[in-house]
Image (cartoon, grey):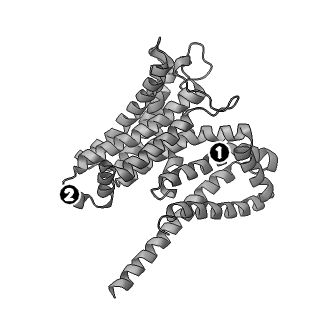
Amino acid sequence: MKFLLPILSPLIAIVSALIVGAILILMAGANPLTAYTALFQESLSTYFGFGNTLTKMTPLLFTSLGVLVALRAGQFNIGGEGQIYLGALGSTLIGLYVTALPAFIHIPLALFAGFLFGAVWGWIPGYLKAIRGVNEVITTLLLNYIAVNLVSYLVQNPLMALGAPSPYSPLIANTARLAIILPQSLAHAGILLALLTAGILWVLLERSPLGYQITAIGQNPIAARYAHISVERTIMLVMALAGGLAGLAGSCEVMGLKFRLFEQVSPGYGFDAIAIAFLSRGSIFGVILTSLFFAALRSGANVMQRSAGVPVTVVYAIQGLTVLFIAISLAVERKITIQNSKLKNL
């Protein structure tokens, strides 16, 4: 049963949120069955809709993996949004200014630059937490605003394309672009890279000494010190890894979807990723499942509005309700665990 909890809890929370969402749709004067059919049929069962869902799932999966790995070490990475922006910037610079390279070199180099830029942005709060004792929630949150405004300045000034009607950079080189995996759709190879990364991260966390150190620090840093684990170094490493994963989300947005750096790189993927990571209960598979659900909501929201007359805001309400229900389940589970512990001590 404990093995199934990371899978069952998100599913129960999602179903509960959809039920309450149906009530909201009824209150809005629409038919829930029609609305949900339009939402999920478009995002999951049509060729172009599913391609759009995979495209939106890519940054969500990368960034939520970054939040999850930080949570394993007891750290709260609220800076995924800023790390996405920095990753997008790093890949854009390589795509624009490093030329005359074949694609099999140019693409990995641009991805590495995105990972590196995001990792540095994640390492900064990791260093401040480990060495200076500064709360990582505050620093990661504030670094979001710095990253967003930095990219905004760059695309409005030195990186702005000549004659551009709005702030964006020139197109990156063709050799730095990710391949399309579903012809005539938006789905690109970034989703394959994200799923591969999820598998590698599972091995790292569940089957490696470093994963043991990360988990030990997250559960009890004092005991980890007695086990001769460097808490400070591991925290900095984990936050850098979290930032790098979110940076890859930004890389894929530039290299696989937009092919240039825009002022608004992310529509809030970094904040959705926080909810996804908490919903997953620390499970990599749970992150994949919940990322797909959130991506499907984003992909089909506009179609639902057009065909059923349901506002897009209902989708955001469903996302919020999902988080609320998983929080309730965690609280109930914690209470049951405490009561069972008291009964054993009697």
* Residue 262 visible in the shown view: no
Residue 46 in the image: x percent, y percent? 74, 42
Q: Which one is nearer the viewer's eye here, 122 or 162?
A: 122
Q: Crowding near pointer 1: few (<14 within 10 Å), some, many (20+)? A: many
Residue topped by disc 2: 227
In which quadrant of the rendered view does residue 24 lie? bottom right
Amino acid type, residue under disc 1 in the picture: Arg
Q: Earlier in the sequence, mark 1 or mark 2?
A: 2
Q: Secondary structure at mark 2?
A: loop
* Residue 210 visible in the shown view: yes
From the viewer's perspective, is residue 54 above or below residue 180?
A: below
Q: Crowding near pointer 2: few (<14 within 10 Å), some, many (20+)? A: few
Amino acid type, residue under disc 2 in the picture: Ala
Q: Residue at x 49, y 50 (%)?
A: 274
Q: Residue at x 29, y 48 (%)?
A: 134
Q: Quadrant of the C terminus?
A: bottom left
Q: Which label is found at residue 330?
A: none
Q: Residue at x 52, y 44 (%)?
A: 61
From the viewer's perspective, is residue 23 above or below residue 311?
A: below
From the viewer's perspective, is residue 152 above or below residue 159?
A: below
Residue 132 in the image: x percent, y percent? 23, 46
Q: Which label is found at residue 298?
A: 1
- Circles 1 and 2: CB atoms closer than 8 Å: no
Residue 204 in the image: x percent, y percent? 37, 47
Q: Is residue 187 left or right of residue 204?
A: right
Query: In the displayed image of the protein, which residue is found farthest to the top?
Result: 100
Q: Which one is nearer the viewer's eye here, 42 or 316?
A: 42
Q: Residue at x 23, y 61 (%)?
A: 223
